[in-house]
Image (cartoon, rainbow, N blue to C red):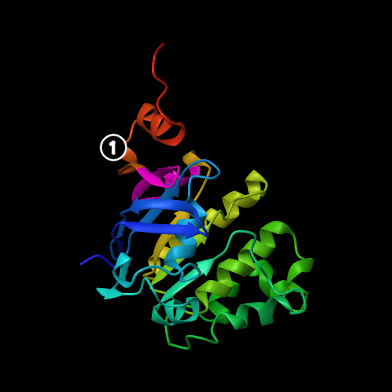
């Protein structure tokens, strides 16, 4: 049984359909990368998995239980935590207060505590009393990741964690992923940077126009196949 599975997942914004029959699986301990261009449906998929967008119950199962119609707080209580695009920190709270919020809805013992997050991202301990939004973009992303880890999730959803960051900062953030995986958490990472996604993923799904257009292990996917699935295959005239 997969840790998480979607079956014929659809999503709508009013009359606009954003997802069309999306089927993905995440096994225990796996890191899955979701790649695709802007507008491919990646963020909509993450919003659906996290409960921000509701669906029919059986469209999403987690640990064998239907969760497609659960609200976001109930999904988080089950063990799914989200690192949202844009970080969404609370500007009136300090770094440490932003981190502590992550544990409020799901207070269980596990690998992640405030001390463990500070060991993962030492700069956050140095800045713990600073306002969360007074940090650099990369440091704010570390806070967002640490906040999600504070709930000791079974599944960590990361939406565009490298977006808008300098390459050296991206390297530091992605260096934390092996330690997160070693804690036992499975991960779904949405990423526009194909090369970065292929480095960390056990399996990759490519999306285009709300559909899965390719899936497989990084080793099994050719550059040509990824290009065609990402941008669409151009037919010869």
Q: Which residues are magenta?
A: 196-212
What residue is at 79 percent from the left and 67 percent from the top? 134
**Which residue is outermost to the left?**
1
In the displayed structure, 195 sits above or below 124; it is: above
Q: Which residue is mark 1?
A: 220
Residue 121 shows in the view: no
On screen, 161 above or below 93? Answer: above
Q: Position of residue 84 (x, y in %)?
A: 57, 63
Left/right of residue 110 with respect to residue 219 in the rendered view:
right
Hey, which quadrant is residue 77 in on the image? bottom left
Residue 229's spot in the image, x, y percent? 39, 35
Quadrant, the C terminus: top left
Please name whichever residue, 175 or 14, is drawn nearer the observer in this view of the structure. 14
| Foreground pick, 92 / 9 | 9
Residue 137 is situated, as x and y percent measured from the top left of the image, at: 71, 58
Q: Is residue 58 visible?
A: yes
Q: Residue furthest top?
A: 237
Q: Is residue 206 magenta?
A: yes
Please say whether residue 133 is one of the residues in the magenta stretch: no
Position of the N terminus by quadrant: bottom left
The residue lying furthest to the front in this view is 15
Residue 107 is situated, as x and y percent measured from the top left of the image, at: 48, 88
Report the residue at 56% width, 67% height from top: 145
SS under mark 1: helix
Residue for point 38% across, 54% down: 32
């Amino acid at each position: 049984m997969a840790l998480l599975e979607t079956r014929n997942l659809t999503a709508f914004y009013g009359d606009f359909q954003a997802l069309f029959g999306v089927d993905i699986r995440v096994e225990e301990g796996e890191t899955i990368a979701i790649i695709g261009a802007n507008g491919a449906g990646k963020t909509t998929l993450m919003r659906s998995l996290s409960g921000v967008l509701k669906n029919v119950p059986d469209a999403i199962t987690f640990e064998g239980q239907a969760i497609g119609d659960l609200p976001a707080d109930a999904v988080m209580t089950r063990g799914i935590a989200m690192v949202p695009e844009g970080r969404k920190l609370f500007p009136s709270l300090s770094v440490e207060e932003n981190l502590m919020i992550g544990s409020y809805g799901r207070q269980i013992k596990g690998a992640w505590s405030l001390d463990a997050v500070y060991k993962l991202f030492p700069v956050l301990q140095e800045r713990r009393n600073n306002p969360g939004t007074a940090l650099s973009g990369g440091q704010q992303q570390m806070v967002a990741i640490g906040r999600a880890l504070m709930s000791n999730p079974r599944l960590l959803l990361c939406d565009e964690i490298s977006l808008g960051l300098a390459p050296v900062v991206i390297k530091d953030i992605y260096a934390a992923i092996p330690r997160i995986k070693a804690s036992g958490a499975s991960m779904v990472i949405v990423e526009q940077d194909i090369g970065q996604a292929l480095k960390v993923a056990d399996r990759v799904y490519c999306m285009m126009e709300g559909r899965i257009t390719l899936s497989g292990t990084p080793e099994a996917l050719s550059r040509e196949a990824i290009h065609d699935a990402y941008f669409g295959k151009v037919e010869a005239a």
